[in-house]
Amino acid sequence: QVQLVESGGGLVQPGGSLKLSCLASGFPFSTYSMSWYRQAPGKERDWVATITSTTVTTNYADSVKGRFTISRDNGKSTVYLQMNDLKPEDTAVYYCNVFYWRTHYWGQGTQVTVSS
């Protein structure tokens, strides 16, 4: 079955950096687009970034453009989210996502807290 396991979250000061990882299994990883979403307390889950499979095109929400970078390593079935210049408003649980066989699959999430 499809499994997505996020890691790399933590507490960081404003202006700091974190790199999230998502290890995927149960589907042909290299042929599917992968995305990151986030959900802040009391808010809806929002899309953050997507990376396609074949062309490796990336897209970002305006709120993170220029600060976050999504990448993938098909040999390791892993998608990454490099987050730089973090702001308190980036505080959220970050989720990895794949849309496979008409179903959205999610990991368990990893908490990112940006605070001084």
Image: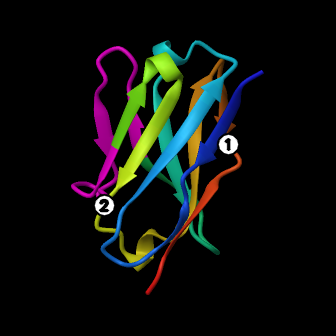
Where residue 42 appears, as percent x and y from the top left, is 64, 75
Classify mark 2: residues with Cα within 10 Å, few (<14), some (14-19) or many (20+).
some
Please tell me which residue is depicted at 66% across the width and 39% down the height of the picture. Answer: 5
Amino acid type, residue under disc 1 in the picture: Gly
Q: Quadrant of the N terminus?
A: top right
Please name whichever residue, 16 or 109, is drawn nearer the observer in this view of the structure.
16
Cβ–Cβ under 8 Å for marks 1 and 2 = no
Determine which quarter of the picture holds residue 29. top right
Classify mark 1: residues with Cα within 10 Å, few (<14), some (14-19) or many (20+).
some
Residue 59 within the segment the image draws in magenta: yes
Where residue 3 appears, as percent x and y from the top left, is 71, 30
* Label of residue 107 in the image: 1
Please tell me which residue is depicted at 53% across the width and 57% down the height of the picture. Answer: 38
Residue beneath disc 2: 84
The stretch in magenta equals: 49-69
Residue 51 within the segment the image draws in magenta: yes
Please name whichever residue, 49 or 101, is drawn nearer the observer in this view of the structure.
49
Please name whichever residue, 84 or 56, is drawn nearer the observer in this view of the structure.
84
Please tell me which residue is depicted at 59% across the width and 28% down the height of the picture. Answer: 99
